[in-house]
């Protein structure tokens, strides 16, 4: 009778533990967005109407290889004056100006100097290298914006 109450790591417990850990890791990454001005308000130029979930990644949904901005962010470790003043996508607009912090004074928790006309610091503003032209994405997948 005592043995029936003993818990062991059966495959179902291992599956549950794995799912719990996977959930923990999947919700941990968005915290980087808290470390950027307008981190939750950065439009995805390749998918009109949607925001970039992983602004530092090649994949706009996050995960996988990082883009030039993501690499610079990793190197800096946080939003620093030099990261703010840099132009990681080479479009002539500083990261700070793209993210609404043109004077590079923002720190986490503050409202950025500007919350309008935010652009992606990892994708060139006029020469986007999108998997699909944005107009074609809108026609094919624009309806998915309602899920954001
Ligand atoms: Ca730029």
Image (tube, rainbow, N blue to C red):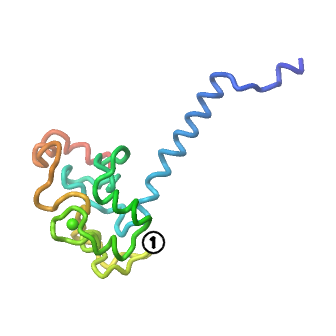
Q: In the depicted view, which residue is nearer to us: 66 or 32?
A: 66
Task: Residue at 82%, 25% (x, y): give it.
Answer: 6
Asked where in the image residue 55 lies, by quadrant, the reply is bottom left
Write down the residue under mark 1. Answer: 108
Left or right: 75, with 16 as reference point: left
Task: Residue at 29%, 76% (x, y): give it.
Answer: 114
Q: Report the residue that reaches farthest toward the front.
A: 75
Asked where in the image residue 141 lies, by quadrant, the reply is top left
Q: Report the residue that reaches farthest toward the right.
A: 2
Give the x, y percent position of residue 119: 23, 64
Q: Report the residue that reaches farthest toward the top.
A: 1
Q: In the depicted view, which residue is nearer to us: 79 or 12?
A: 79
Tell me the quarter of the image containing the N terminus.
top right
Number of labels in the image equals: 1
Left or right: 36, with 46 as reference point: right
Q: Is residue 4 above or below residue 40?
A: above
Q: Secondary structure at mark 1?
A: loop
Tell me if mark 1 has few (under 14), some (14-19) or many (20+) residues whose alpha carbon lies within 10 angstroms of its own.
Answer: some
Q: Is residue 69 above or below residue 87?
A: above
Give the x, y percent position of residue 95: 27, 69
Give the x, y percent position of residue 76: 40, 66
Q: Is mark 1 within 8 Å of ligand 1?
A: no
Task: Residue at 30%, 60% (x, y): give it.
Answer: 69
Give the x, y percent position of residue 75: 39, 62
Asked where in the image residue 73 lies, by quadrant, the reply is bottom left
| Ligand 1 placement by image quarter | bottom left
């Amino acid at each position: 009778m005592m043995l029936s109450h003993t818990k062991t790591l059966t495959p179902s417990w291992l599956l549950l533990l794995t799912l719990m850990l996977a959930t923990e890791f999947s919700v941990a990454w968005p915290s980087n967005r808290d470390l950027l001005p307008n981190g939750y308000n950065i439009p995805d130029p390749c998918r009109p109407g949607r925001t970039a979930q992983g602004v530092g990644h090649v994949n706009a949904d996050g995960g996988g290889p990082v883009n030039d901005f993501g690499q610079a962010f990793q190197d800096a470790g946080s939003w620093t004056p030099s990261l703010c003043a840099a132009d990681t996508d080479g479009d002539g607009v500083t990261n700070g100006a793209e993210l609404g912090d043109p004077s590079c004074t923002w720190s986490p928790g503050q409202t950025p100097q500007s919350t309008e006309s935010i652009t992606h610091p990892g994708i060139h503003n006029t020469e986007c290298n999108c998997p699909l032209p944005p107009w074609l994405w809108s026609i094919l997948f624009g309806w998915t914006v309602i899920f954001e």
